Image: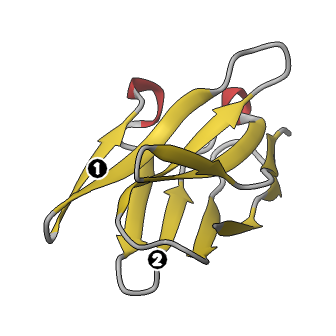
Amino acid sequence: VQLVESGGGSVQPGGSLRLSCAASGSIFGIYTMGWYRQAPGKQRELVAAITRVGSTNYANYADSVKGRFTISSDNAKNTVNLQMNSLKPEDTAVYYCKVAIGGLDYWGQGTQVTVSS
């Protein structure tokens, strides 16, 4: 399974960024696609994830990003996106895409998001 992330970068507080992740390879039976982040000196934490149950997607978010971030996915293309609005300095971190398939987790290489004035 390969995960290719794009997006990220530097933005001022209040700005927006969009992250995208495309999965390829042996990806039959994806259960969850989502985004995690890790700030310096902190543990990696869930930002948002989509869980597939049959043909329905269920999204969940960290409390800190609710109302500001929106996760979306294209089941046919095996992609997951994270639209980040109203960014804050505390959103600064390396963001990782994660896909869960058959009980195994696969991670992307990470992309840096920096929010600073």
Q: Earlier in the sequence, mark 1 or mark 2?
A: 1
Which residue ends up furthest to the bottom in the rendered image?
A: 76
Establish if 16 lies above or below 74: above
Q: In this view, does 115 lie to the left or right of 31?
A: right
**Residue density around tag 1, few if under 14, some if 14–19, many if 20 or more, within 10 Å:** some
Which residue ends up furthest to the top in the rendered image?
A: 41
Q: Give the distance between the C-alpha atoms of the residues marked 1 and 2, in whole angstroms.
A: 15 Å
Q: Which residue is drawn at 41% across and 58% down?
A: 71
Which of 63/36 is in front?
36
Q: Residue at x 28, y 49 (%)?
A: 59
Q: Name the residue under label 1.
A: 59
What amino acid is labelled 2 in the image?
Asn
Q: Is mark 1 on a helix, strand or loop?
A: strand
**Residue density around tag 2, few if under 14, some if 14–19, many if 20 or more, within 10 Å:** some
Q: Residue at x 76, y 35 (%)?
A: 93
Looking at the picture, the colour scheme in use is: secondary structure
Q: Residue 69 carries which label?
A: none
Q: In this view, does 36 lie to the left or right of 109?
A: left
Residue 46 location (% of width, % of height): 51, 32
Q: Is residue 11 something one can see in this rendering?
A: no
Residue 107 location (% of width, % of height): 67, 50
Specify the quadrant that holds the C terminus: top right
Residue 18 location (% of width, % of height): 62, 65
Specify the quadrant that holds the N terminus: bottom right
Q: In this view, does 38 lie to the left or right of 72?
A: right
What amino acid is labelled 1 in the image?
Ala
Choose mark 1 or mark 2, whichever is in front: 2
Q: Is mark 2 on a helix, strand or loop?
A: loop
The image shows a total of numbered marks equal to 2
Quadrant of the rendered image containing residue 101: bottom left
Q: Mark 2 points at which residue?
A: 78
